[in-house]
Amino acid sequence: MLPRSLSNFMNAFTSADHTTYPFATTNQQDFQNLLSVYLDATFHPLLKEEDFRQEGWRLGPEDARAVGSNGGKPEDVLFKGVVYNEMKGQISDANYLYYIRYKENIFPAINNSGGDPQYITDLTHKQLVDFSKRNYHPTNAKILTYGDMPLAGHLKQIGEVLDGFSKGEADASIKQPIDLSRGPLDVRVPGPIDTFSGEDKQFKTSTSWYMGDTNDVVETFSAGILSSLLLDGYGSPMYRTLIENGLGSSFTPNTGLDSSGKVPVFSVGVNGVSEEEVPKVKEAIQRVFQESLSSGFNSEKVQGLLHQLELALRHKTANFGIGVMEKTISSWFNGTNPMKELAWNEVIDEFKRRYQEGGYLESLMQKYLMNDHCLTFTMVGTPTFNKDLDDQESVRKEKKLAQLVEQHGSVEKVVVHLREEELQLLKTQEDAHNADLGCLPSLRVEDISREKERKPVRETRVDDVEVVWREAPTNGLTYFQALNNFDGLPDDLRLLMPLFNDCVMRLGTANKSMEEWEDLIKLRTGGISSSAFHTSSPTELGKFKEGLHFSGYALDQNIPEMLEILTILITETDFTSPNAPGMIQELLRLTTNGALDAVAGSGHRFALNAAAASLSRGLWVQEQQSGLAQLQATANLLHDAETSPERLAELIEKLRLIQSFAISKTPGLRVRMVCERDSAYQNESVLQKWLAGLPRTPSPTSAPGSSFMSRAIKKTFYDMPFKVYYSGLAMQTVPFVHSSSAPLSVLSQLLTHNYLHPEIREKGGAYGAAASNGPIKGIFALTSYRDPNPNNTLKVFQNCGLFARDRSWSNRELNEAKLGIFQGLDAPMSVDEEGSRYFMSGVTHEMDQRWREQLLDVTAKDVNEAAETFLVNGTRRSVCLLGEKKDWVESEDWEVRKLSMNPSEGEANGVDAENAAGSA
């Protein structure tokens, strides 16, 4: 349905005890179409055996067409299947693995929502069908709709489907976690080594307590407030005690209050712990409990959290309906009335009443946390962990093959049989791909307006600074955004921009600690931020801007104070305090500790950015700012900071240099404000006063050095401890305003749905594969995600151009591709985002309108020509793979790199530690 709809959201979420099938669209016919398909797919699934073998698991040769009729050798047989490979990739994420193993131990009554590869291969097709019949029945279902379309129509359409079922017996059982009433439990499990943590810091440990019953909505809300007071921000008591004091480097993924089950669970834990300090973590947590109980909670901190909730209710987001679903579904399945969950103001008012009586939060702490009825869960980094997984997979494979030998008589016959099954599945997949899908409902391109909705902005100059205004209903909020553009920024300072932004929100100033600043931010604003930005020109390929991006929002009357807070934090963060060196090292550890997991979660994006970096200086700058090169630079900085006081001092001087020009009234400064019309005059006055008080220090410049090396074709392989691969191939194309930009976007949709998905996911077993056109960056990309067969994927990538050039694209295929693009173009937009595209990238309404018309008018001939020009004949391309290095890597001319805490291993990444931390 993806290419037949204008949906702005369509997915399926597998949870531990339920599955959610959400979709969203602003088109009424589209809503009816999707509802009919979703109801049919969930209540009447076909669940064919070949689908189970494709999506679940099977045994077969890696490439059935490459082996002879004898089927090949037994060692060529491997486990395949989309979900099987997805979950092999998922457990490469150590944080995910920790969380799943923790849940299995504290809550064995519920399921591993994604599935564990070592058990997936025990599942049979019959078991799947029986499970579906037993559970996916209207008696067990909860149905939620949100929006402004008439409810009567939804109920009629849903009712017609439900009338086809007789009432069954609902599964009303409420799953409970293990009993902790008899005292502390301690569980240890093995896990992977984190190559970005020291050899003596390979433990992750947390302790968990139960906090009542989620049916008590007010108490569960109050427990969430208590959790925030203990954990949120650098000034929180748990952060200071566990991370600032060096027991661990970051919080474990289960840290916080989990209210998704019948029993709320509060957990605190840290990663990067040494073996001898594992017991000290629990002791430190309990010490924080005792100190907090003795001193009580600061009323100002509580008021700050309530202020954040008030602003969250005023903030108009585009995905409010999905948020309602996420808030209510889990507790609804656990017996809570969803309308009580949504009675937000009543819940807050009751909390305030209890809090005003005094000692309320402390009483909750005494009731639930001041005891030893807890579970301590520890994962031990084990050097042989990945090899052990491989060995276990081999044992499972041999066991399955032995069972097949009993059926077929010999291993040779089994191999031939598996090859024949694989070839039959390939034929079934091809037949399915060519099947007539006319039975599926679809919107028409003619239903799309040729006119882009105009969100008018006005431009003024305030104190000689360009300001873009968007006036819209904001519920009394004003949104602020500023860009400070740096021309010719020296390479060494660019690498430090992410660290500088972290320091701004961590170090504090000479007269206020960060804890005090965090309290003030919560009391007076909806949040402020500082980040690096990078945007490409829509009119000229290779031209780009970079710098720092500042943003925040607040009630209209609090905007002066918000701007003052932002300015003081940027200009007065105290890099000279005695605590600054330790805090900077702590920030570097935070980033490096989570580096591998960050890559495992979105490896295809990291691979693509690394590939694109060799195509232009602008894309190389992007990689230095936020890609694998940035992660390696951070690791190098941490190594230098921990081993050389001189290098640490030099690093701090560079951060102070950035501070001197970070927010300055220079020609590179621009501002955007979103507010109600009645607030604009007052905001302009506030803005004028703020701009007049800014420093006027220009950023340092340097001539582009030799760091960036452009190559026509480049192959880069990052050796990483993942069980599957991620790939990215980037090709340079044209700027946004070029007439080929729209055909390239249509081409990307056509390739994704008609070639890459069937070849790489359905046949190759990868969890995902896609083509995408970056019209602003001028990049056409091919990616794969959690991919067991990267060599096959690269061959498919290589054939993309010829496939697209030579195919006679039908009108239906073209229309579906265009619908897919307009899902994003016409999706609802949060009010604070209105006008942002023009402000950030310079794309005018007229440019967007012209591109829209070109998109609607793209023909099959345009697509064929774009494929020939850019995919077949294009010479500017680069490819990057992430994954475990095998023998074939050495034989295929890859440039091999490795992310590592050891600078000698990471130096091949195009990042020079001397450059990052050396003297200014």
Image: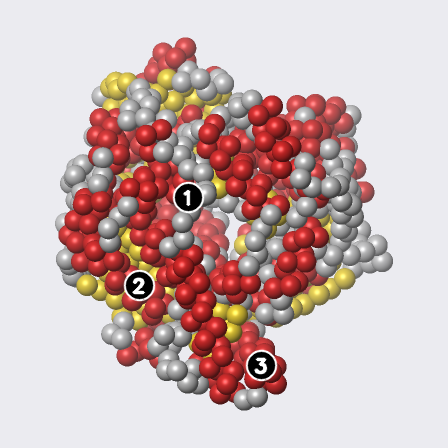
Closer to viewer: mark 2 or mark 1: 1
| Residue 12 vertical placement versus 597 (above, below) | above
Residue marked by disc 2: 796
Q: Residue 225 occupies which quadrant of the picture?
A: top right
> Could you tell me how far apart the alpha carbons at marks 2 and 1 are, in whole angstroms?
28 Å
- Per the image, label 3 sits on a secondary structure element best described as helix
Please provide percent x and percent y for residue 252: 59, 55
Q: Is 906 in front, or is 118?
A: 118
Quadrant position of the N terminus in the picture: top left
The disc labelled 2 sits on which kind of residue?
Val
Please provide percent x and percent y for residue 298: 66, 33
| 775 with respect to 640 (left or right) | left
- Per the image, label 1 sits on a secondary structure element best described as loop
Residue marked by disc 1: 438
| Residue 458 vertical placement versus 506 (above, below) | above
Mark 1 or 3, nearer chain start: 3
Q: Say if mark 1 contacts mark 3, CB within 8 Å.
A: no
Residue marked by disc 3: 404
